[in-house]
Image (cartoon, rainbow, N blue to C red):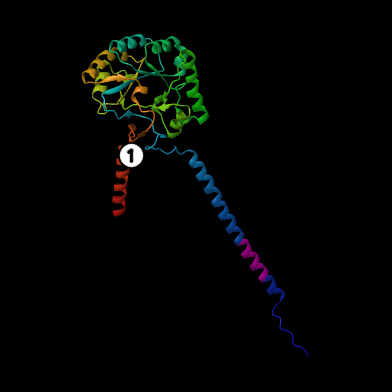
Amino acid sequence: MSLQKPSFSTPALSQEINTSYMKIMTAILLIAVCFYSVSYFRTQSLSSDSSSITAPVSTDSNHTELPIYSVEREDAVIALTFDAAWRDEDLDDILTILDQHQAKATFFVSGDWVSDYPDAIQSIHAAGHELANHGTHHKHMPLLSTEEMTTEIMTCHQQVYALTQTNMTAFRAPYSDWNGTVVATAQSCGYASINQNVDSVDWKDYGVDNIIQTVLNDPDLDNGAIILLHNGAKYTAQALDELLTQLENKGYSFVTISELIYHDNYRIDHTGRQFPITPSSESNSDSSQFLQHLSDTSD
């Protein structure tokens, strides 16, 4: 006679076990779905946020994403720059005054201005001044795609080249509206990005004396300064002769942007000031970084 292992299973107990099992599996499935959903939407959110983040600003290499605001120079030279996107009725007066002072300037021209005033482009070029790029339609560049930025820059480039057979190399964003992508795009088009550190605010039409005093009293007026003016503004041409005289009295002479800036072996600090890189300056920079590292690790 053989003994059978007693069975404790009953239909009611089996049903209860099955119900508990289904509840557990359902809970596990819900947890997995929730975890996947959170991970998915977090990834999508980070991806969306990253597309709107301005490219990081680099200040220590040639491939900087900060425009040049001023230049470290030992000699007392400064750059007069005119944004040309409005009218041209004062241009002859401006060119005459510049010639009287033997001053060379840089004119940042928009493509629309080039189309409206091709003779003005020829006059600026013939007088020995530098032509530079101010975009085609004077748009806020950071609002554009990279392809649209490129079109804005290169269309203006081609317009000026067709008239002068000159390849412009300096670009200023309209409204001085920059981000890293604008600078990088300009660089990919062969352009140095140029801003300014002395603004005459001539476009506000405060008067002749205001333009002169705004420039002369600017604390950033120094060797290597880049001064912003506009042709087509109400009082700029009237203020220009006295402004240049006062600047000359301070010992300054005037050069174009291409003559002012360094085209290679340079760095740009956090203020947008461009410095030449020499072996000694690199050594000093390395030493400073090492001392700063020691200071940071000892804190």
Q: Which residue type does callout 1 highlight?
A: Glu
Residue farthest along the front direction in this orientation = 279
Q: Quickly name the residue at label 1.
A: 282
Can residue 145 be spotted in the picture? no
Q: Nearer the viewer, residue 37 or 13?
A: 37
Task: Give residue 133's position: percent from left, percent from top.
Answer: 43, 21
Residue 242 figure quarter:
top left
Q: What stretch is highlighted in magenta?
A: 17-27
Q: Is mark 1 on a helix, strand or loop?
A: helix
Quarter the N terminus occupies: bottom right
Task: Give residue 90's position: percent from left, percent from top.
Answer: 35, 10
Q: Which of 292 and 119 is in front in this view?
A: 292
Residue 67 figure quarter:
top left
Task: Give residue 129's position: percent from left, percent from top.
Answer: 37, 15
Q: Is residue 22 magenta?
A: yes
Task: Give residue 194's position: percent from left, percent from top.
Answer: 38, 26
Residue farthest along the bottom direction in this orientation = 1
Q: Nearer the viewer, residue 265 or 226?
A: 265
Q: Does the magenta stretch include residue 171?
A: no
Residue shown at 30%/44% (left/top)?
287
Quarter the C terminus occupies: bottom left
Can residue 95 be spotted in the picture? yes
Residue 72 figure quarter:
top left
Residue shown at 40%/13% (left/top)?
125
Q: Nearer the viewer, residue 170 or 83?
A: 170
